[in-house]
Amino acid sequence: MYRSISLIYLALYGCFVIFARQPDYFDGEITSATIHFAKDSATQVIVPFANFSVGANKYSVKASYPLRPLNESDKIEVIYDSTNPKKAVIYSIWGYWILWDELLVSLVIYLILFQVAVGITNNPTPEALIEQLEFKPKPKRKYDD
């Protein structure tokens, strides 16, 4: 039971991930970028930015993400929507495909629902136990008339 429920969870999470990414994997374009550390205008903290160009236009997007170390002048890939390259993101497993907040929420929901299912099936009522013990399946015919 544990294995089948876990496989269902992984399949559903995988389907969610494929179709929930922005910019879209199927319509987005991937290009190379260079990491450059600069001061963020909102927080006044030095953070990594990915600098890339599309045609003659140059773009810069935040590249910081928890547990993803980046160094100055690192070469990385970014994925962007051709209609709005300003909303590009770093194209990597950790940060594009797997987002820590989505993963955490889905695991919490999975564990809660799993515990509810185990709690329901492990403590049947006495009436349900008697019904299961008295159940006798009808013999089935090989062919219907």
Image (cartoon, rainbow, N blue to C red):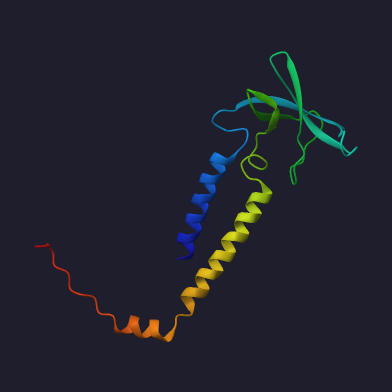
Residue in the image at 59% along x and 65% along y: 112
Image coords of residue 23 (percent x, y): 62, 33
Residue 30 sits in which quadrant?
A: top right
Query: Which residue is rendered at x = 68% and y = 41% of the image?
Result: 95
| Snapshot quadrant of residue 76 | top right
Q: In the rendered image of this protein, does residue 34 appear above or below residue 12?
A: above
Residue farthest to the left, as pictured: 145
Q: Position of residue 90 (x, y in %)?
A: 69, 34
Quadrant where the image shows the N terminus: bottom left
Question: In the displayed structure, does residue 41 sit left or right of residue 49?
Answer: right
- What is the residue that sits farthest to the right in this orientation? 44
Image quarter where the C terminus lies is bottom left
Query: What residue is at 12 percent from the left and 62 percent from the top?
Result: 144
Q: Residue at x 75, y 19 (%)?
A: 58
* Percent x, y of residue 2: 49, 65
Residue 6 higher or lower than 78, as above or below? below
Give whichever of 73, 110 is nearer the camera.
110
Spot occupied by residue 121 in the image (x, y as percentages of width and height):
46, 74
**123 above or below 67?**
below
Q: Quadrant of residue 140?
A: bottom left
Q: How many marks?
A: 0
Q: Position of 30 compared to 118: left or right?
A: right
